[in-house]
Amino acid sequence: MDFLKSVTSKKALEMILSLPYIPKTDIAGVEDALNRVLAEDVISPEDIPPFSRSLVDGFAVIAKDTHGAKETNPRFVYLKGEIKIGENADFAIEDGECVRVSTGSMLPEGADSVVMQEYTRNLLDVIEITKVVHYGENICFRGDDFKKGDRILGAGKRLNYFDLGILSSIGKSNVLVFRKPTIGIVSTGDEIVAIDGVPGSGQIRDINRYTLGGLFRKEGFQVIHAGIARDDVKEISEKIVLLKDKVDIILISGGSSKGEKDYIIDSIETLGGNVLFHGINIKPGKPTIFASLWGKPLFGLPGHPGSCIMVAIRFVLPLLKNMEGEKDQTLKASISGVLTMNIPSNIGVEECVDVVIEKKDEGIFITPAFAKSSVISAFTKSSGFVVIPDEKEGYEKGEEVEVYFF
Amino acid sequence: MDFLKSVTSKKALEMILSLPYIPKTDIAGVEDALNRVLAEDVISPEDIPPFSRSLVDGFAVIAKDTHGAKETNPRFVYLKGEIKIGENADFAIEDGECVRVSTGSMLPEGADSVVMQEYTRNLLDVIEITKVVHYGENICFRGDDFKKGDRILGAGKRLNYFDLGILSSIGKSNVLVFRKPTIGIVSTGDEIVAIDGVPGSGQIRDINRYTLGGLFRKEGFQVIHAGIARDDVKEISEKIVLLKDKVDIILISGGSSKGEKDYIIDSIETLGGNVLFHGINIKPGKPTIFASLWGKPLFGLPGHPGSCIMVAIRFVLPLLKNMEGEKDQTLKASISGVLTMNIPSNIGVEECVDVVIEKKDEGIFITPAFAKSSVISAFTKSSGFVVIPDEKEGYEKGEEVEVYFF
């Protein structure tokens, strides 16, 4: 096909990610901040934990008082009192003394370790210790988590559930996060009817709206659908204009292959946009358009459901995460396994093949599904995909390959 | 510790998953059905695609008419007309004929393959073909996705974005799905104050509410928080009662270790519940309680944030997915790598260690973080965890281990 502005996969991603975009910010309550990207550095206003705590039920001691202690040769310490959970430790211990503590109790001044209850015997005011403890044992020291003034989370970090715990530990109930971009989708094609429509002869229902919508909603993005446009510049342009003030990125599914490309390209140019590339040397997904319109990124995605979703996963999602202000994009979950059959591939084209992953006692086995990109059924049986770089002529049966999860 | 009803990790999971529960169902629109579990078998009412389609722009032909065709020795076929996208193919082709088609066009009766446009030359009403095609090439046949009457998705399947595409392809805009269980959380402990509270000496803020909430919301579950209860049977029981008619599963964080266990156990028993086990031979997370109350599962989770979340990931999440009616729980994303240091472990205890994963040119390297379970900061730097089975005395530096992602 004679794509005028065709690029490699690497170049495409480079161009996509270099599009300038300044994310807006929101204030989010900590419970709503999951999977949002921090727009501020979070500094600890105090030591966390704010006091040294026991990690077990037992007796807070000075470690050296337990040296040499065994079942047959216990050491004795004087029981000075008890500090219950949530109570202030308003006394100190000295050599030869101990205090009864519970898991989570504040430690008394002077204590540097805790003997677990099962290694003690209680003789009225005296405690027999039957096992040595070392300095710091069974203790979480003041500031073990963070010191006052530490930068505990940095701008650009996507917040996971541990991060929510960290924010709550310092009492930060609201955080500044980047706004998630809103995505607008236009489905195009004379052959496309809505899900509740009755396809005429030669027509099919809109699939990409739902696969794309699912992919993006899964990541927490808001998706707006402008409807289905016929293969007509005026109709496509009108649908795009509908999205102008509502979305941060526009996706047009269908109509990007050569026979139809003029509709999308003409629509973009009619509206004053600038086509940055047309065609990526990948399979599936070659007839992809990337443009800038009203300062917003715009993709023309292939109409075949399999091609459409693969381009969305590999090129649109990274852009969305970039637009969200994410600095270090998280490691994409992947698994390695042994190929059960050859995957042929053409040099000069980066190919993606969806695969089935099987875990057996002997290891992990990867079988290509070789779904036609027009067929959606094979994908639901696949767990992920293998990427064959453009300089490779495929992988051979028995080779170890890396699979990225859908 | 003398846990009265302590069990192995395997036995715990067995008991947890065998608790009887009949999930309710909902009707969901296809766009809201992502990550929901199907409660019905979905049968295709028609062949999908409903007609044979071209996968490329070019000329629909009878494959044998192209045999022997090359650049230097083209074959000729007569151009009978054009079928545009979305149009009905209301004529047939016979030997020596072809029809111009676009990607997605319906094929005329008689055609069994499509020659791509770039391997043709147009001589008025005659098309020169310069490359052989084989039967089925560049075609998606009627019914390639599904045949009428095929069970295309089965009850118990969690719907991913491909499945939404499948549902839309057959025009199924509403599906019967299982209701997601609602989770109630009670935080307990005299030392715990709310996120916007000012901890007194010996007190800390509630962390588990947010880490647990994040974990469950990430999976699309609704979470209700009943507030913080002091270490007091009456207060804990009151909070549990608040959740009675609102939730399907109750989690109590904190207060499950030996020094405090009586509060939780007594509360459960006072309310008429039945403690099924107390203590799992795992680290972290040993002081875990599992009970049945009002026919609902109830967990007493350890108070340490690291222990609490690990038990929730490994024991509560599988139960939730079971309660959702999921039949084949999806392969948990994991990665294998080489340990950069030893991980010691005790025989008889299944240990979980959170780890940092590094991808380098030479491979994937796994470094244990050895976070104290009381410290939340280390977890945010970790990507996942390694499980050391109870019969193993740890893993050695250089061994290949499997890491499960958080």
Image (cartoon, coloured by chain):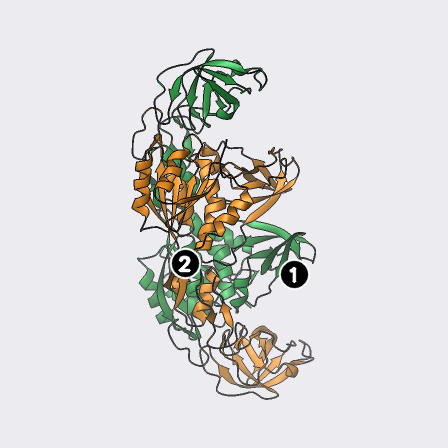
Chain colours: A green, B orange
Of tags 2 and 1, the one toward the viewer is 2
Q: Nearer the viewer, residue B85 or A406?
A: A406
Q: Nearer the viewer, residue B273 or A331?
A: B273
Q: Chain of mark 2?
A: B
Q: Position of residue B179 (x, y in %)?
A: 39, 58
Q: Is residue A319 visible?
A: no
Q: Secondary structure at mark 2?
A: loop
The numbered disc on residue B170 is none
Rate crowding at label 2 as few (under 14), some (14 to 19) or many (20 or more) other CA atoms within 10 Å: some
- Chain of the residue under label 1: A
Q: Amino acid at mark 2?
A: Pro
Label annotation for residue A343: 1
Vertical side of A72 occupied by B217: above or below: below
Q: Amino acid at mark 1?
A: Ile
- Measuring from the top left, give residue A232's x and y in whole percent: 39, 73
Instruction: Please state the horizontal and vertical placement of residue B157, each as a whole percent of the image.
Output: 48, 61
- Marks 2/1: CA–CA distance: 42 Å
* In the image: residue B136, left or right of residue B223: right
Residue that extends furthest to the top in the rendered view of this protein: A95
Residues at circles 2 and 1 in contact by the CB criterion of under 8 Å = no
Circle 2 is placed at which residue position?
A: B23
Instruction: Provide residue B69's location: percent of width, then percent of height.
Output: 67, 79
Toward the viewer: A380 or B13? B13
**Which residue occupies 57% across, 20% down?**
A71
